[in-house]
Image (cartoon, coloured by chain):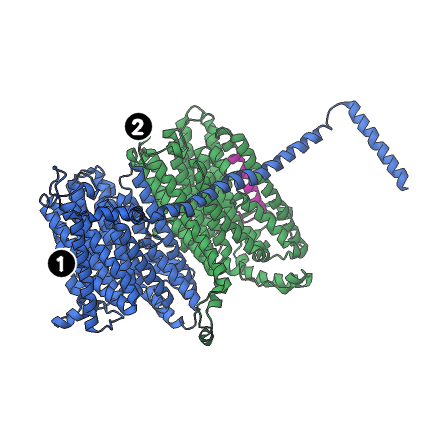
Chain colours: A green, B blue
Amino acid sequence: MNLFENHILSTLIFLPLMGILFLWVVPQRYSQLLKWTAFLISLLTTVIGFYLFFSFQSDASMQFLELYPWIPSYNISFFVGVDGISLLLVLLTVVLQPLIILYSSPKTQSLKAFYCLFLLLETGMLGVFLSLDIVLFYVFWEVVLIPMYFIIGLWGGAHRIYATVKFLLYTVFGSFLMLAALMAVVMIHHEATGIYTTNILHLYGTFFGTLESWLFLGFVLAFFIKVPVFPFHTWLPDAHVQAPTEGSVILAGVLLKLGVYGLVRFAIPLFPFATKGFLPLLVVLGLIGVLYGAFVAWAQKDLKKLVAYSSVSHMGYCIIGLFALNVLGVTGSIVQLVSHGLATAGLFFVVGMIYERANTKEISKLGGLAASCPRLLFFFLILTLASIGLPLTSGFVGEFLSLLGAFQEFAQPVLAHSVIARDAIAARGDLSFTIFDIFIFLLGVFGVFGVILGAVYMLGMFQKVMFGKPKFENMKDLGFKECAVLIPLVLFILLIGIYPNIITSKTNPSVDYFVKHFSNYKIPTAITISGEQRSSASLRAEHSEAWQSKQEALP
Amino acid sequence: MKEIALYIIILCPLVGCVLQLLVGAKLPKVWSGGFACCAILLSFLGSAYLFMSFEQGFSLAWLPWFQVGELQTALSFRIDELSLIMMLVVSGISFLIHVYSLGYMKEDPLYSRYFAYLNLFVCAMLILVTADNLLLMFVGWEGVGLCSYLLIGFWFEDEFKAFCGKKAFIVNRIGDAGFLLAIFLSFSLFGSLSFDVLSSKAAALSAELNFGILSLLTLCLFLGAMGKSAQFPLYVWLPDAMAGPTSVSALIHAATMVTAGVYMICRLHFFYDLTPIIQKVVVIIGAFTALLSALMALTQRDIKKVLAYSTVSQLGYMFVGAGLAAYGTAMFHLTTHAFFKALLFLGSGSVIHAMHGEQDIFKMGGLKNVMPLTYLTFFVGSCALAGIPPFAGFFSKDSILAYAFEASPYLWGVLGVTAVLTSFYIFRTFYLTFHGSLRNKNAHESDNSMVLPLVLLAVGSLVIGFIGLPQNFAHLFHASNLFEKFLAPSKHLTLSQGLEWGIMFLSVLGALLSAYVAYVFYVRGTSVLETMSARMSFFYKLSYNKFYVDEAYDALFIRPLKKTADFLWRIIDVVFIDGIVNGVAWFGRQSFLFLSLFQSGKVGNYAFVMFVGALIVIILLAHFR
């Protein structure tokens, strides 16, 4: 047991990869055996994931650390660990993976390759969430790309080639910028300290001087493309529409989360000053994403495209909450990640199930499904409500906390302004608003405007698809397998919605730590004036103190 | 013990709902319906127990709930005078309507699903009225909205009904967005969401706070109330909500859910008390809505539409009461209205049932003898709505009128005119439905399970008014206003007794007169009616078409927004952003193609290019030496 405990993370990461070897020996023609082998392997990762969740201590430290030298000359190592934030995303991944394999029907050609790619994908995703070495992270980041490329390209719809090329070029463009920035980070750290390291915990607090903004943008662009944030989102609808259902689920469920996670783990902690500097731009982009995604989703005629654009809108909340950089906002952002992963994955499953029956995804051709499919109605309704963000679903917790955190942060100057002295109010005696009141309030209004729009396009879609005169005779209701896929999703959505503490108790310490150490930097005047080298030494000393506790925890 | 009672009150409907969803469809109808009724009965008994054993208000925290950073909110409930009244009204009326539904929905294939939704509604409504913090209140707030959505579109095979459900949800969501903003604001200002903390901090900080920000907060709260309680300009969903089963209209869209806005103002009165300007807004919106919707009700042909506009109008009265800080009176009107409006709706449901789905009052008539009990109870309800003594509506409405007169005679004028109109349109409906010649020979009295709630509600509409005697009556009979005594209102009427009698006399006279006019028009049948409607056909059309408000919203908001959505997608997304992306890709491809020209593979070409290059180098070297 001790051996397992000490290697739990590497077991988790490489189990799916090992699983590929098992699949390799199963002959192609035993399609059921292939499926259930793949399912069993991914179910095993789920079990390990839950074991990890329950044995995780609710504190801020990185836990289950494993460190093995990999390229010693540059101190690049296989360094993995988990904190409250990555824990949830790992859990999301291992919950979705078996459901996807369970859902997949052994219909397609080259089934073996299909399952092998999904297992490889799982290794990549878990690797991204667990890596604490910046080069290791980059390797896993790219590993994720390859299976997704093939999944869309081989099993996709009619225009899959255009979609895959677009997906690949967008993402590769971002990740090469990140690679350049990443190398610069390592080199600058080496120049300042004389030590090569790619260990992210050591790299935190490095002083980059005037380069910081450029490096930050390199990282942020890569992550924003992945999220995706307006205006880098146009690969998403194409990829979703062309991808097979299983691909859409994993894309929306986990792959989009990599971007936000990258911001949390790398971009913001490495470049706190640049984060502060670009904050207004980033938040406004998030806000535009919320509204723009909602509006464009409203205009869609295709069910899958609608859900894809709704993702753009929902991920906007993550961005807004994250860049509030306070406990509420960051927690909201993370809960929203999980919630969006569950709800949108479920919605894509449902779209796939409807497509199997009606053979169309066009909203105007569907209608009246509720009459013959009460079970579909039930699951689809809960998923839709979670997507709208109704209280007691996880969607509400995410949206509410994100917006509350953002409001608290960005309205603070105005609220402070509004608390005026007792005698001043007597002197003023009027009820007028200041221009700032109105401006910030409008930002809040726009945020909640997204909440209204969410109801408009989701319920509009729901009404057209489910209600009205039945357009299909004898539509089959959901079967046992399909219910088995959707029940866990709905259960988690309700569980998180009703009792959010169940996950926030795990994230709270990590988020506290994150907020305390990365958002409270006072921007030193030295930087704003010139990026003098003189101040860099003192700054570094100051910051490394903050990180000492973390570094002491290293094995 | 009190804790257990609270558990029972809130969880029984929830358990009922889950049971119905899981196994209800397989059970015989008697069982599934019976279970649903029992769940609500238990809730009612629990509420009654709490009411009987009530000494003073208290809060109960069940569980920690949201614990993130500074947001520390518990799943906590509050039992005090206000919530007890609401609990009794909600669970009591709900129980009667559940019983009524046993008969009303008898033929429906989705019987158990109907009861599941109805149980869920009661649960959400009880959470709303017992919540001890804004967040939990919001949970109930959206929960009742969801149930309303599901129940309006209950017969979803009709596209229009499904559309009405969606419309209700979205218009409500606009109000809810206001509520959400108010939550954000109050958390940012006061650092908590619990009512106790908010009220004490608001009072303490009011001197230091900019009025603007506090007014903004209160206005946002009021926006939420306007959405849920169907006040102008967000009332448009309620008339369409009549697409649902009539029992649902009675419960959700007349007696309970739509009054949540009034309850919310009373619950959060400390914010309103600090912002007189918003109180004025509440009064003006309330009075305007009352008058506007009474005008719309005058000409409607659909019996449920008449009652719907009447509900909007009566809610306007309650808002006037709440805006004038006469919270006790507003709550009193809420209570009496719950009785008589539920009665009227259930009566209309009984009529519609008897008429086999016909809702047009001009196609009814003569039902007096066929359905005597429905007739009698509907008469009681009409009198109560018209404000004729000694029915319940008289006491509560006149109390609001008296407060209005105290505040401003003009306000009283508006509400008085509305009262006269109210009496006219409800008696118009009454006469057209029950008097005249019998037009449908197949009509019959409804089942016992439907008539029994009608009788109980009629008795309620008769006696409930006496618990809230106005001051002059109280003085006369040496009794006291039990209701206000229990609720301990913050405000007392300062009018002289003579004035109070005078106002009362005027409004009763107006109501009786217009009831008589309705009698003359629709029973005696004079030619005055035709000449009038011919002369004023413009106004008639305006009223019948609801002042074209729906059309205006469509042209002003919905279509432009939809156009924006299309523009953003087709132009910005597809043409602009993707144009740039594809343009870059095209440019890349073209430049590769161009460069590939140099790789022709012909040795002669390479030799030529090498020669030219060498020549250029030599020339350059020679030149710069």
| A140 magenta-colored | yes
Q: How many marks?
A: 2
Task: Tell which of A223 and A12 is nearer to you.
Answer: A223
Residue B184 visible in the displayed image = yes
**Separation of residues labelled 1 and 2 (CA atoms):** 52 Å
Residue B266 visible in the displayed image = no
Left or right, B136 with respect to B212, comes to left
Q: List x then y, in percent, for residue A44.
A: 41, 39
Question: Which of the 4 quarters of the picture holds residue B189?
Answer: bottom left
Give the residue pinned by disc 1: B462
Left or right, B172 with respect to B510, comes to right
Q: Nearer the viewer, mark 1 or mark 2?
A: 1
Amino acid type, mark 1: Leu
Question: Which of the 4 quarters of the picture holds residue B495?
Answer: bottom left
Task: Tell which of A439 and B384 is nearer to you.
Answer: B384
- What residue span does the magenta drawing correspond to? A131-149
The residue that appears at 27% across and 41% down in the rendered structure is B154
Q: In the rendered structure, the residue with mark 2 lies on which chain? A: A
SS for tag 2?
Answer: loop
The residue that appears at 81% across and 26% down in the rendered structure is B607
Mostly what secondary structure, the magenta segment? helix
The residue that appears at 51% across and 40% down in the rendered structure is A124
Q: Name the residue furthest bottom.
A: A423
Do dots 1 and 2 share one subunit?
no
* Label of residue B273 in the image: none
Left or right, A151 with respect to B372, comes to right
